[in-house]
Amino acid sequence: MLIPPEMLESDTLTRLIEDFVTREGTDNGDETPLETRIARVRKALQKKQAVIIFDPESQQCQLALRDQVPREWLEALDD
């Protein structure tokens, strides 16, 4: 299930993004400041290039690129 970013409280969204950009293996030697990486993800979410996926079974959220999720999920988000 996809969750629109605006449905999350600001602090919750920030923590989700911080977790994503600081996860081991995501920096690939990138020295970009944390604030810049967070801003990039926020922009991708605003442009709908990235989405938030919620798994009800595990109660976990994760970020993904829009083209990595099933089309029917996107149609439900865009309605």
Image (cartoon, rainbow, N blue to C red):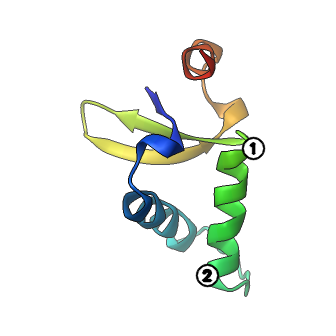
Task: Report helix, strand or loop for mark 2.
Answer: helix
Q: Is residue 77 above or below residue 34?
A: above
Question: Which quarter of the figure has residue 74?
Answer: top right
* Residue 41 % position (x, y): 66, 59
What type is the residue that disc 1 sits on?
Answer: Lys
Viewer-closest of 66 and 46? 46
In the image, residue 29 lies at what x, y percent? 71, 82
Residue pictured at 61% horizontal, 68% vertical:
26
Find the distance from the CA under tag 1 to the CA under tag 2: 20 Å
Q: Residue at x 47, y 65 (%)?
A: 14
Query: Which residue position is annotated with label 2?
Result: 34
Mark 1 highlights which residue? 47
Left or right for 14, reference 75: left
In the picture, residue 39 is in which quadrant? Answer: bottom right
- Helix, strand or loop at label 1? It is loop
Residue type at mark 2 is Leu
In this figure, what is the number of numbered marks?
2
Q: Nearer the viewer, residue 68 or 61?
A: 61
Residue appearing at x 38%, y 54% in the figure: 9
Q: Is residue 32 above or below residue 37?
A: below
The crowding category of the residue bearing disc 1, from other C-alpha atoms within 10 Å (few below 14, some 14 to 19, many at least 20), is few
